[in-house]
Amino acid sequence: MSEKTKFATLYYYKNKKKMSNATIHSNLNPLDSMMKRFDEAAKIIGLDESAYDTLKYPAKIVTVHLPVIMDNGKVKVFEGHRVQHSTTLGPSKGGIRYSMDVTLDEVKALAAWMTWKTAVVGIPYGGGKGGIKCDPKSMSKGELERLTRAYAASMSDVFGPDKDIPAPDMNTGQQEMAWIVDEYSKIKGQYTPAVITGKPISMGGSLGRVEATGRGVMVCTRSALAKMGLKPEECTCVVQGFGNVGSISAKLIEMLGVKIVGISDVTGGYYNPEGISVEEAMAYSKNNGNLGGYTGGKNISNAELLELECDILVPAAMEDQITDANAGNIKAKLIVEGANGPTSANADKILNDKGIIVVPDILANAGGVTVSYFEWVQNRMGYFWTEERVNRRADRVMKSAFDVVFDTGKKHVVSLRTAAYIVAIDKVATTQKFRGVF
Ligand code: GLU
C-alpha cells in the first residue's frame, strides 16, 4: 500500500464513526460540517498526517469577557471570541459577528472556512473569525459602541495589520469597524487603518467593498450558468436573506436578466412568480427596517421559500438552512452559497444525487474578502482605486477562482465543494511544507 493510500485509509477509519453519526442526526453543527468536507478532500488528495493534524485545529483561540455599562447603569458581561485558524499563507483574516447564536464551535468553523476561502481565491491571508454573543437589535448605539471598543481593546494585542485583520460579518458593518480602528489606533498611538477592513470610505475603506460579496455571488452565478448551458434571461432565482449579501446578490443577479421570484428576511419569505423588483424591495426594507408587510409577493415561510420552483437558489442568510431534512425537496438546478455554511454536510450527498450544482460558500462568497484584501493593499499604499478598478480586479479574481475549482472538480470527478476544498487544502499544506513546523 502506498503512503498516500495508507493515510487516506487511515482518515477514512478515523472519521468513519463521525461520518455515520452525521447521517443519523438531521443537523450537524458547523464545525462538524466543516470537518466532514475537510476529511473528504484530505482523503482524495492523500494529505499527509502531519498536515492533516495541523490544519484540523485552530492555531490560536482567545476568549474574553467584557464588562460593559448598559444605559440603565448596570454592568453586563459579554463573552467574545477570536479564533485564528491558520496564518500559513499570511495574517489571519475574517469578520466579527454579533449574535446570540455565537458559540466557540461556530467561530472555529467560520475561522477555518476563512482559511479555505482566502486560499481558494489566492489572496495572501490565513483565516480567522471573531464573535460576540449579544443581541445587537436590543442594544442602543451607545451600548454597542462601548461593547465594540471593549472588544477592540481586549484584542489589541491579537489584531494587527500583519497579524490578524478583522472585517464585518453578521450584524456588524462600517460603524463597528470605525470604532475598532479608532480604539486600536488610540492604544497603539498611531492611526492604523490597515488593521481592519470594511471601514467607512472616509476612514480608508474601499469603494466597492459593501457590494463585493454580492458581486462575487453574481460572478459565480454567471459562470455556473454558462457552464450549465443556461441563459440568465430564461432563469428564475430565489434568494434567502435580505441583508447586505442577499439584497445585493439579488440586485446584481436580476441585472444579469434573471427573474427574482422569491426573497426573504426574518419576517418570512415573499414569492411572486411574475418577478419581484429588487430595487423596490430594497427601498421598502430600508424604510421599514425589514420586509414585514411587503406586498410585492405572497407571504410564505422561510422553509417554503427554499423549496420553491426556481432555477437558482441563493441561501444568503445563515448556517444550516439546507439539511438532510429539506434537501430532497429542493427544486433549484443551481445553488450559490452567499452565506457561510448554509448547507450542512449531511445534505451534500442528497443534492449531488439530485444533480444540483452547488457553488460552495468558500468560493461563492469570497468576493467580500477579496475586496477586503484590496482595501488593505490601498491602505498600505496610501493610494486609492476607482470603483471600476476594484470591481474589474475582483471580478477577475472570482472568475479565475471559479474556473480553477471547476477544472479541479472535473479532474477528480467530485462536486465543486470538494474541489474547492482540494484547491485550498493543497495550497495551504504545500506552503506549510515550505515553511516547516517545529
Ligand atoms: N465576513 C466576510 C466573510 O465571511 C468577510 C471577511 C473579510 O472581509 O475579512 O467572508
Image (spheres, grey):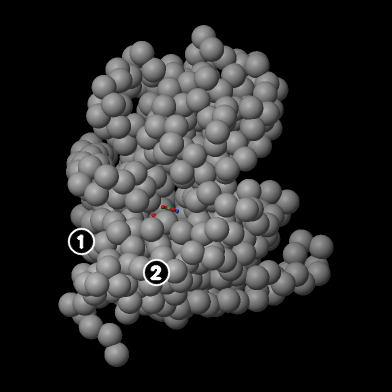
- Secondary structure at numbered mark 1: helix
* Residue at image coords 57%, 43%: 323
Where residue 92 appears, as percent x and y from the top left, is 36, 68
Q: Is residue 52 left or right of residue 426?
A: right
Would residue 57 be found to the left or right of residue 44 on screen? Answer: right
**Which is more toward the observer, 133 or 356?**
356
Q: In x, y percent, where is residue 433? A: 21, 77
* Quadrant of the drawing holding the N terminus: bottom left
Question: For the residue carrying disc 1, how many other residues have a C-alpha within 10 Å: few (<14), some (14-19), or many (20+)?
Answer: few
When asked about the image quadrant of residue 127, the answer is: bottom left
**Of helix, strand and loop, which one carries label 2?**
helix
Q: Residue furthest top?
A: 274
Closest to the camera, between mark 2 and mark 1, is 2
The residue lying at 50 percent from left, 77 percent from top is 61
Residue plotted at (59% across, 59% down): 21
The amino acid marked with disc number 1 is Met
Can residue 339 be seen from the camera position used here? no
Location of mark 1 (residue): 381
Residue 56, label in figure:
none
Where residue 360 sits, quadrant-wise, is top left
Q: Around disc 2, counting alpha carbons within 10 Å, would you say few (fewer than 14), some (14 to 19), or many (20 or more)? A: many
Q: Position of residue 436 (x, y in %)?
A: 23, 83
Q: Nearer the viewer, residue 287 or 406?
A: 406
Tell me if residue 95 comes above or below residue 201 in the rendering. Answer: below
